[in-house]
Image: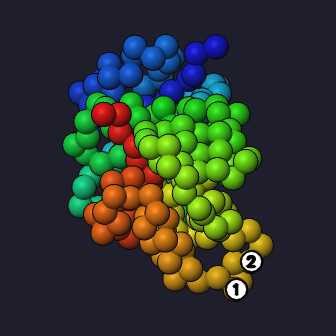
Amino acid sequence: MNPNLLIIEDDRKLNDGIRLALKGNSYTFFQCQTLREARPLLREHRFDLILLDVNLPDGNGIDFVREIRTRSQTPIILITVNSMELDIVTGLDAGANDYITKPFSLMVLRARVAVQLRPQTERTASHIRTGPFDFDFEKMEFRKDGRLIELSKTEQRLLRVLCENKEATLKRSYLIDTVWQGDTEYVDEHALTVTVKRLRDKLEEDSGNPRYLKTVYGIGYTWSVKAP
């Protein structure tokens, strides 16, 4: 069955542009321009992904994320503008899974959508090959260009959650909760910063100018490996 995508964007041209950019991927599209139009669609259909504009003529997209989260965990990608960093942080805190800023490239749009639609079984694979890296989390063997790299248990946990969510922005609070499971009372954000630095020192050619483990300022981190 084709994934169902709901696009909620009041700019009709952009709304249609998103559909056209993704139409080659066998998705079924539902399009609307207001929250009033979106609510009955959400009651009548099951969606695999929602693309949601933050600023709509009849309401705030972030408030709508909170509304959706009271009854559904459907992945949500926010559509926002470059200058509204507060909207991005607030939206992720409200329960959005990712965001994309206007204007955006079609390549970025497709990558962000593909990440959210990736099957859970693929996300939890123990052996991940990505770019120059070969990570076997079951055997605890980690290689870059065939060269073995030693990682601590904490570094392994952080790397795994980043790789399983490749190209998605993960909040610092989410990473702390996931990597230091049950021990967050004794962990502060400095521990995450230190672990990120150690991973970069081991995986990046230039840890001061990272190519793979990137910082999204004010939010968190993303693992990005582009095809050559």
Q: Which residue is mark 2?
A: 183
Q: Amino acid at mark 2?
A: Asp
Viewed as shown, does residue 146 lie left or right of 119? left
- Residue 109 placement (x, y as % from top left): 35, 35
Secondary structure beneath label 1: helix
* Relative height, residue 100 to residue 199 (above, below): above
Residue 19, image quadrant: top left
In the rendered image, the residue lying farthest to the right is: 182
Q: Residue at x 64, y 82 (%)?
A: 187
Front residue of this view, candidates 223 and 133: 133
Q: In this figure, which colouring scheme has been used for the structure?
A: rainbow
- Residue 153 placement (x, y as % from top left): 68, 66
Q: Residue at x 38, y 63 (%)?
A: 215
Q: Amino acid at mark 1?
A: Tyr
Task: Point out the image quarter for the C terminus.
Answer: top left
Asked if one can make out residue 163 in the rendered structure from this viewpoint, the answer is no
Asked if one can make out residue 22 in the rendered structure from this viewpoint, the answer is yes
Residue 134, image quadrant: top right
Cβ–Cβ under 8 Å for marks 2 and 1: yes
- Residue 162 placement (x, y as % from top left): 54, 53
Q: CA distance from mark 2 to mark 1?
A: 6 Å
Q: Residue at x 40, y 14 (%)?
A: 24
Residue 205, image quadrant: bottom left
Q: Residues within 10 Å of mark 2 (few under 14, many from 20)?
A: few
Front residue of this view, candidates 63 and 83: 83
Q: Residue at x 44, y 58 (%)?
A: 203
Secondary structure beneath label 2: loop
- Residue 152 placement (x, y as % from top left): 64, 67
Image mark for residue 167: none
Q: Which residue is mark 1?
A: 186
